[in-house]
Image: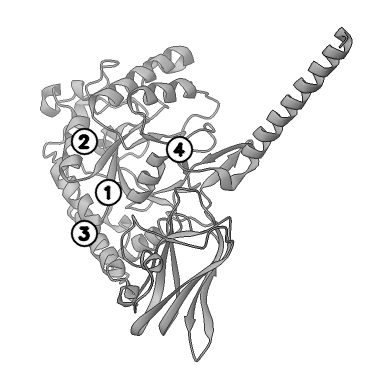
Amino acid sequence: MTLASLRKNLLRRTMLAAWIGCMAAGVAAQSFPDIKPAPQQTQWQDLEFGVILHFGTNTFLNREWGDGTASPKIFNPKQFDPEQWMTAIQASGARYVVLVAKHHDGFCLWPTEQTDYSIKESPWKDGKGDMVAEVAAAARRHGLKFGVYLSPWDRHEPKYKDPVAYDKYYLAELEELATRYGDLVEFWLDGAGSTGRTYDFPKIIETLRTYQPDTMVFADMALFEYGDIRWAGTESGNITYENWNVIDRHGYLRWRPVEVDTPLRDLHWFWHPNDEASLKSVKDLVDSYENSVGRGGQWMLGVAPDDRGLLPDSDVKRLRELGETLHSRYAENLLRSHLPIDENAANAVDGDEATFWSAPAGSNSSTLEVRLAHPVRFDHSLTMEWLNEGQTVQRYRIEAWQKDAWVPIVSGYAIGHKKIDHFPAVTAQRIRLQILSSVGAAHIREFQVFAPSPVASGP
């Protein structure tokens, strides 16, 4: 073989290898169904309902947006009791809390070594307290996981004018939070106030991952491509679109479930005096839950202690009413009274989210039918996918056997982690879930229907 032919053959092989590599990368990059969640993502999605706590100098100044000029001396919650907070939060049905450790005003709720603009300079506990530590400990005593919010925007810190110096400052604060307070279930990155500013997000995530590799990172899609959780787009408390877990940003595909943040009080994240009219009704809260968790998302409810350091009595009562109402609506799956079925089908109606029904291998459509011992009346359903191998269901329909024929009750597209459907009440003894289209065999963790249970609108 001549040198010329050798070169030509080598070039051909190199081009072929490059083409194969590009094709493989292109297929991987463009195949939504091939994107799978990390184990910590499915564990986080199973939590479903969290609470975010706003408490700081704004609480004492009747403000939503602090400008960084408030004196630390005003921060003095004389009846501070995180046990009271967590008792109320636990009663609501929430499973984790995220504490706003630093809001946009720059005031820190832990004794950071990076600035004196913190509780060190407040009269609370003579400047010797650590609110992040006390809230984290109280949460865990009540079986709630704990996370933190650390605002990138800082309206107090002089270094903010110098992006390089401020990035170093922020990373030092983050390292303190990531190393002092145990496992963090979620880290909140808020982009508010950051228009025109680019933070060193790769270094922020690198620092967090060094100490907290399993923490889920929340961020608006506009901030960077590689967060673990994405924002719903509004603070209305609802998902208004078909919710697919894989999202595309600039050609970058990632499993990134949506989180819906909304406050317990209309438009208010911090506590304000003489503001009882803003408290949302139980009906509004249940509607928000069913249009967030019930559309495959995560529900993050904003709760705010008052200037005593306690949750207001009305908020405590509303959180308890919320938990009681959700429990009553979803406590009894009527399909549990089924006639004998095979073990595979039983896995979908056993109330155990660790088990699941599998459609026939390789199928793109399938049917899960349940026959009951007696007719039942129901008006809402709950369906869950097993997501470990990805989100596969593309279209589905629920049907009831009526007058010797299957009658459609409701139909939809995405199921995802959990889908709650409502429909006019129907009575039936045979009910089935039709998977009309799926990417491979569907896997259903739970299929449930529930008796009508109107939610009182309340004050």
Q: Earlier in the sequence, mark 1 or mark 3?
A: 1
Packing grade of label 2 (10 A; few <14, some 14-19, many >=20) is many
Q: Secondary structure at mark 4?
A: loop
The quarter holding residue 44 reads top left
Mark in the foreground, 3 or 2: 2
For this view, does 350 lie left or right of residue 76? Answer: right
Callout 2 amino acid: Ala
Which residue in the protein does label 1 denote?
95
Q: Quadrant of the N terminus?
A: top right
Residue 247 visible, this orientation: yes
Residue carrying label 3: 320
Q: Say which element carries label 3.
A: helix
Helix, strand, or loop for circle 1?
loop
Q: Name which residue lies at 38% across and 48% down.
A: 45
The answer for how far apart the CA atoms under marks 3 and 2 are is: 21 Å
Relative image position of residue 3 (x, y in whole percent): 86, 8
Separation of marks 2 and 4 at Cα, in angstroms: 22 Å
Amino acid at circle 3: Arg
Residue 285 spot, x, y in % from top left:
34, 60
- Whole-number angstrom distance, CA of label 1 to CA of label 2: 13 Å
Q: Which residue is mark 2?
A: 136
In the structure shown, which secondary structural element does the residue marked by tag 2 occupy? helix
Q: How is the image coloured?
A: one colour
Are circles 3 and 4 on residues that touch, CB within 8 Å?
no
**Alpha-carbon neighbours of circle 1 within 10 Å: few (<14), some, or many (≥20)?**
many
Q: Which mark is residue 228?
A: 4
Q: Position of residue 273 (x, y in %)?
A: 25, 47
Q: Nearer the viewer, residue 56 or 136?
A: 136
Which badge, 2 or 4, is on the more N-terminal residue?
Answer: 2
x then y, percent, for residue 178: 30, 25
